[in-house]
Image (cartoon, rainbow, N blue to C red):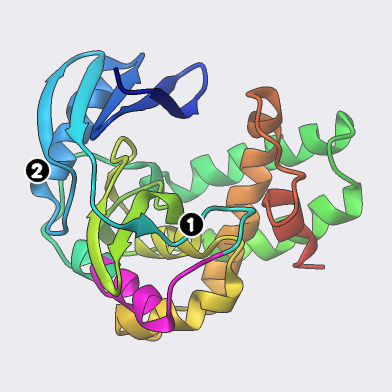
Amino acid sequence: MDEVEVVVAHSERATLRVGDVFLKVDADGARLCAEVEAMSLAPVPTPEVLWYQPPVLAMAALPGTTLGRLGGPSTGSPAAWAAAGAAIRKLHDAPLPSRLGRAGRSIAVLAAELDAECELLVANGFLPADLVTRNRQVAEAALRPWTPAFTHGDLQIAHVFLDGDEVTGIIDWSEAGRGDALYDLATFTLGHEEHLADVITGYGTDADRDVIHAWWSLRSLLAVRWLAEHGFDPFAPGCEVDVLRSRL
């Protein structure tokens, strides 16, 4: 019998790998159905869906490897990072899905959530006040009007597989939908600022780096407390707290 590998797990969902099959279990069955729909619409390689019966989705494993993970060393040539940027651009240029994604939260909703979270981070002693204040200032640049795009919504580098310099597939579409394209670019390069230029080269446009930097701060501020409360370590080297410190 193949060994069962826990890829990621928390109270909302878990992903397991058994041989060449990934099993995703999501407590929200509607979100799982939306993920399958997003993969069917996306104009980029996605895993083959073997079957799904909420709350479980079975997918074939993808060939190749990822470019790394947040907090770990990055791999791949500049051409590989550029290829990922080109795939992201192809997604963003696709016809819009009907669903609003994680990257599509309104300015008002984001600002209110961010202000409340910053207050909690300081009041509960999670982070120093000066670190929170500075990153809240940087994050302000992300709170601006944007043109909707087909976004992945959780485009971590661990979700993009490549074989050499070719993208072989993108996984974990549960947050996909209409949203801010720069949110995806920021998520993909979070903690790996040294590859931002390569990604933008492949993306094929002069993406606003100040807004991408703002999304790094915003996403990290909103994630720190949740990660700590769900068994992850945002204080590990290269992770969210280091991203926040890099803005000082």
Which of the 4 image quadrants contains residue 243?
A: bottom right
The CA span between labels 2 and 1 is: 22 Å
* Secondary structure type for disc 2: helix
In the rendered image, the vertical position of residue 244 relative to residue 195, given as above or below:
above
* Secondary structure type for disc 1: helix
The span picked out in magenta is 74-87
Q: Tell me if 97 is positioned left or right of 7 in this view.
A: left
Q: Which residue is mark 1?
A: 187
Magenta span: helix, strand or loop, mainly? helix
Disc assigned to residue 237: none
Camera-side residue: 243 or 141?
Answer: 243
Q: Is 81 contained in the magenta span?
A: yes
Q: Callout 2: few (<14), some (14-19), or many (20+) C-alpha neighbours within 10 Å?
A: some
> Where does the N terminus fall, quadrant-wise?
top left
Q: What's the amino acid at mark 2? A: Ser
In the rendered image, is residue 156 in sight? no
Q: What's the amino acid at mark 1? A: Thr
Q: Tell me if 51 is positioned left or right of 101 in this view.
A: left
Which of the 4 image quadrants contains residue 162?
A: bottom left
Q: Which residue is mark 2?
A: 40
